[in-house]
Image: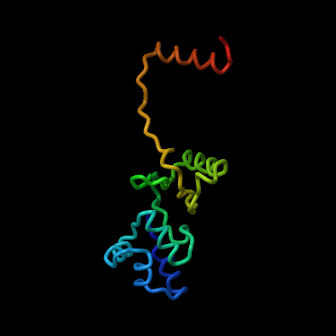
Amino acid sequence: MRLNINNYQDILAKKQLSHEYVWKAAGLSERTYFWILDNGFIENETLERIADVIGCQVRDILRPDYEGYSENIIEWKKDAPKATLSLSQRGMIVKIKRLAERRPDECQILAENKDGSICAHVPVGWIKINLPKNLSEEQRKKRAEIMRRNCLNIE
């Protein structure tokens, strides 16, 4: 994830918050905090903690990771219930938006960027890696026939 340094600095100035206050209240070391400010990269959990400390929404200090190129990112910590998705692929964006509408308790869109990319939370259990099946032509035909029968309820 990327921290929008300019928006972040503006919020700090408007609310008259010091860097020291933020890093301490967010439970960060001074070194880690200034590394984030120097490099702009930040973990989702840290971004959320900082947003809570300064009293803003994550989207207010989130910077799109994509600047003219397509990238899809999945981030989660061990034993965490939610994963963070940063998506620029249109098909995945549409899928996640539909899931967020149908299942708002499980899927939340944190930010929508001007380029159409999104940042969202989903349950880690939704993340799957499926290898393609190497089926022979005969196996494909057999599976297709089974699916046709199942769809048409033909015995």
Residue plotted at (57% across, 70% down):
57
Of residues 94 and 55, the one nearer the viewer is 55
Outermost left residue: 31
Residue plotted at (47% across, 58% down):
68
Residue plotted at (58% across, 60% down):
112
- Image coordinates of residue 13 in percent, x first then y, are 51, 86
Of residues 94 and 29, the one nearer the viewer is 29
Outermost bottom residue: 16
Number of marks present in the image shown: 0
Direction from residue 147 to residue 85 in the image, left or right: left
Outermost front residue: 79
Quick check: 119 above or below 128?
A: below
- Image coordinates of residue 62 in percent, x first then y, are 50, 67
Quick check: 23 above or below 150?
A: below
- Image coordinates of residue 124 in percent, x first then y, are 48, 48
Quarter of the picture containing the C terminus is top right
Quarter of the picture containing the N terminus is bottom left
- Image coordinates of residue 143 in percent, x first then y, are 53, 18
Quick check: 126 above or below 79?
A: above
Q: How is the image coloured?
A: rainbow
Residue plotted at (59% across, 56% down):
108
Q: Residue 44 occupies which quadrant of the picture?
A: bottom left
Direction from residue 27 to residue 57 in the image, left or right: right
Of residues 134 and 16, the one nearer the viewer is 16
Q: Residue 36 occupies which quadrant of the picture?
A: bottom left
